[in-house]
Image (cartoon, rainbow, N blue to C red):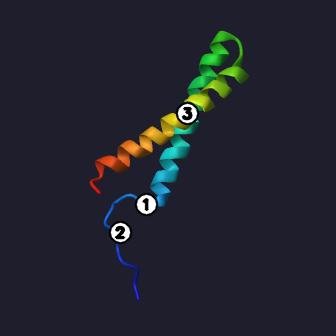
Amino acid sequence: MAAAASSSPHSLATASGLLLGTLAFAMLVGLLLGWLVGSAGIGLLVGAIVGIPLSIAVVYGVYSRSGS
């Protein structure tokens, strides 16, 4: 038997990709800004701290727009 198709176009892989992609992007921006200021390690840490809630907000925004 074939598995029933999901009613949502989003999957767990999509959510994981959004989380990891957003976190990596925030860390990269933090690293670059920290490097410009003179402390790349601190910038990377700040990027990770900012990236965690940002990635959750991105996933929430995508999934809340999809209907139900």
Residue 43's tag is none
Residue 11 lies in quadrant: bottom left
> Local crowd at mark 3 within 10 Å, few (<14), some, or many (≥20)?
many
- The outermost residue toward the top is 37
Label 2 or label 1, whichever comes before in sequence order: 2
Residue 11's tag is 1
- Mark 2 lies on residue: 6
Q: Amino acid at mark 2?
A: Ser
In the displayed structure, 56 sits above or below 15; it is above
Please give the name of the residue rendered at 48% of the width and 59% of the height, measured from the top-left corner. 12
Residue 21 point in image, percent of width and height? 52, 42
Secondary structure of the residue carrying numbered label 2? loop
Residue 39 lies in quadrant: top right
Work out how far the residue at label 2 is from the one at label 1, CA to CA, in angstroms: 8 Å
Q: Amino acid at mark 3?
A: Gly
Q: In the image, 58: left or right of 5?
A: right
Q: Are marks 3 and 1 in contact (CB under 8 Å)?
A: no
Label 2 or label 3, whichever comes before in sequence order: 2
